[in-house]
Image (cartoon, rainbow, N blue to C red):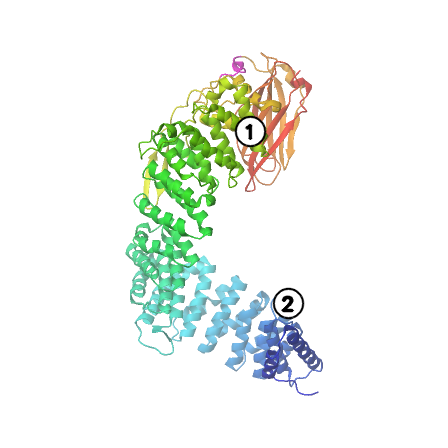
Amino acid sequence: MPAPIRLRELIRTIRTARTQAEEREMIQKECAAIRSSFREEDNTYRCRNVAKLLYMHMLGYPAHFGQLECLKLIASQKFTDKRIGYLGAMLLLDERQDVHLLMTNCIKNDLNHSTQYVQGLALCTLGCMGSSEMCRDLAGEVEKLLKTSNSYLRKKAALCAVHVIRKVPELMEMFLPATKNLLNEKNHGVLHTSVVLLTEMCERSPDMLAHFRKLVPQLVRILKNLIMSGYSPEHDVSGISDPFLQVRILRLLRILGRNDDDSSEAMNDILAQVATNTETSKNVGNAILYETVLTIMDIKSESGLRVLAINILGRFLLNNDKNIRYVALTSLLKTVQTDHNAVQRHRSTIVDCLKDLDVSIKRRAMELSFALVNGNNVRGMMKELLYFLDSCEPEFKADCASGIFLAAEKYAPSKRWHIDTIMRVLTTAGSYVRDDAVPNLIQLITNSVEMHAYTVQRLYKAILGDYSQQPLVQVASWCIGEYGDLLVSGQCEEEEPIQVTEDEVLDILESVLISNMSASVTRGYALTAIMKLSTRFTCTVNRIKKVVSIYGSSIDVELQQRAVEYNALFKKYDHMRPALLERMPVMEKVTTNGPTEIVQTNGETETAVLETKPPHSGLQPGSQANDLLDLLGGNDITPVIPTAPTSKPASAGGELLDLLGDLNLTGSPVSAPAPQISQPPFLLDGLSSQPLFNDIAAGIPSITAYNKNGLKIDFSFERSNTNPSVTVITIQASNSTELDMTDFVFQAAVPKTFQLQLLSPSSSVIPAFNSGTITQVIKVLNPQKQQLRMRIKLTYNHKGSAMQDLAEVNNFPPQSWQ
């Protein structure tokens, strides 16, 4: 058989291939020749064939058939054969294949070989692909080589020991005695690998970490020698002595000094020396400074040293290298909460990074800028961020707008400034704002009573002829509907009032309705605003009626429903229209932290005392809002009124809900459970003065009203002793899934011939595995003794998702209503 071609010739031939198919053909032809040679047990050219096979493997072609040939080369006595065999084993074998276990004996023999280079090959292979079984068998040989005087073998043995510890952590203590002496070595290679080994041991074992903390002075001394030593050609990189070893030592010091005062104190001085003496003109010096900064920030360092570290990052921001600027911004973002004032000194440089061309730097600069906003600099920072919002790429606008909203809400110096800022955001990037921006701004405007005239005038001017920013148009429509009379009367004192007629205002809202850019939600806002203006304007009511009636046949179901209901208001319930469409009351944000909450600001901590106001007499704002939403176009067919006291009789709710026509449902007034709030008048009140239930209850069977997705709702029944028309239903909610259901809310509605009162539940969390239940009481007044029907709505959170479901209950037992 002729001698196979050499590796160089194969490479040259493959490179002449003009197409992928031609290359594949050459490879297949050569693989066939190599297989034939392997079958003939050709020992002369085995090394050459395996080398060519490795090159093909590097090109991405299959080479698994050469695995056993690698083992034969490792068993050879020739160094050249062993070298290719071990290289092939590292490339073609791994611990998932049982073939690698056949190498164990060969590696063990080679670890005890008389030639250091053969021992080095065995150490490299074991450290690269040794399995846990191999590591257990050969750990003793590795530990012996760690103690040898040969520095070439010691550095390879140290890296191999790192791999052994990763595979079999319980063998860590075996290397402890040998590791202590490694730091006394003068050879930089051994020092470097010993620091890597120490780092691995400290990261994996708290006991080792405590044990090695006493080596901090020795590590400090090694680092100091590196800094103060003169020029050493074999270790010098760009004028710095062995930067790789310096970086490794700094990382080890960071681990040793974390959460330890004594170790941190011992390394403070050397860290200051490294920070001040390292040359920053080359990238090598910047790498060392960056590791120094990370170490200073991670240990319990002195405040002056932390300021020095932040100043280094500030200098990084002025560097021409984009990577260094990005690293600096990322590091400052991590430290801004702990060293806020020090980072604030570099605010102008950080803001300048918003103008960088690199998108990654822009994003980090934007995040850091928002972290720096506080009550003292909010005006200046918002000015810069609004300018950035105006000019940034579309992918930044959503995050930037959200950040401005949050910062403005937290640090706004005045309500006018707050409103102006949010309106500027909506004008600039309205299409990118998050979903809750519109209701939040509406709440802000509603609560700023003295700013109503100014706000509606600004919004009116903002949408003249431009309906592209949908959230802005929605807010403007809502405000014009609420405060259109202030706009027409020209009562604005904050700026020069404009002269607007009622017809001009309606022209704008009608333009919104017919604009192709208006979304369905926006048209709903505009139509409702026009309806509200029927009670605020005097000269254009007939025009409003005409507009509303036109949309009664709209193809948009939402608009059609609103228009039909509004028409009914004009025709059948005109006497109720002024009360229904009166101005929204001030909306109060619900706080969950009690009367006092701690407001954490950037660099400032304030205690904000929240006023606890007595409950209003009459209908609560939240209840009004939900009533109107249910009346004026909510898609939910179950009218649910939240728990809030009301002084109006329950029949009023039913009268209003007659507008829903064939829906034939009535909203039920719901009593509040809190003891400090008086219960609303209700037809079922007064039952507590006597025994509530009679003996009929014992004969009423329970029913399962709902059973889906692991949630089960059971109804049990009792009848009132004093009023046979009253049925008291006790619901029991249980959860058979493996996770709790939280924020559980049960709501119910009944036909208009019934009265319903929903009392407070025993809890809002349903325990998993049926380990507990929630109970809640419903009182139903059925004076006409009609068959009971109920529609229920369930909302809860489960497995991180918000769940909602509707159901009808029509299988009430006759004993519960006859």
The answer for how far apart the CA atoms under marks 1 and 2 are is: 77 Å
Residue at 46% x, 42% y is 469
Residue at 44% x, 22% y is 677
Query: Which element carries disc 2, helix, strand or loop?
Result: loop
Give the vertical position of 307 relative to 505 (above or below). Answer: below
Q: Residues within 10 Å of mark 1 (few under 14, many from 20)?
A: some
Residue at 42% x, 70% y is 192
Residue 682 lies in magenta, yes or no?
yes
Judging by the rendered image, the residue that carries numbered circle 2 is 97
Q: Quadrant of the N terminus?
A: bottom right
Judging by the rendered image, the residue that carries numbered circle 1 is 550
What range of the chain is rendered magenta?
Answer: 681-689
Tell me whether the residue at label 1 lies in contact with that at label 2, contact meaning CB atoms closer than 8 angstroms: no
Give the vertical position of 817 relative to 353 (above or below). Answer: above
Residue 383: horizontal and vertical position, in percent? 34, 47
Q: Is residue 591 visible?
A: no
Residue 95 lies in magenta, yes or no?
no
Residue 502: horizontal and vertical position, in percent? 42, 28
Q: Relative to the observer, which residue lies in front, 464 or 758? A: 464
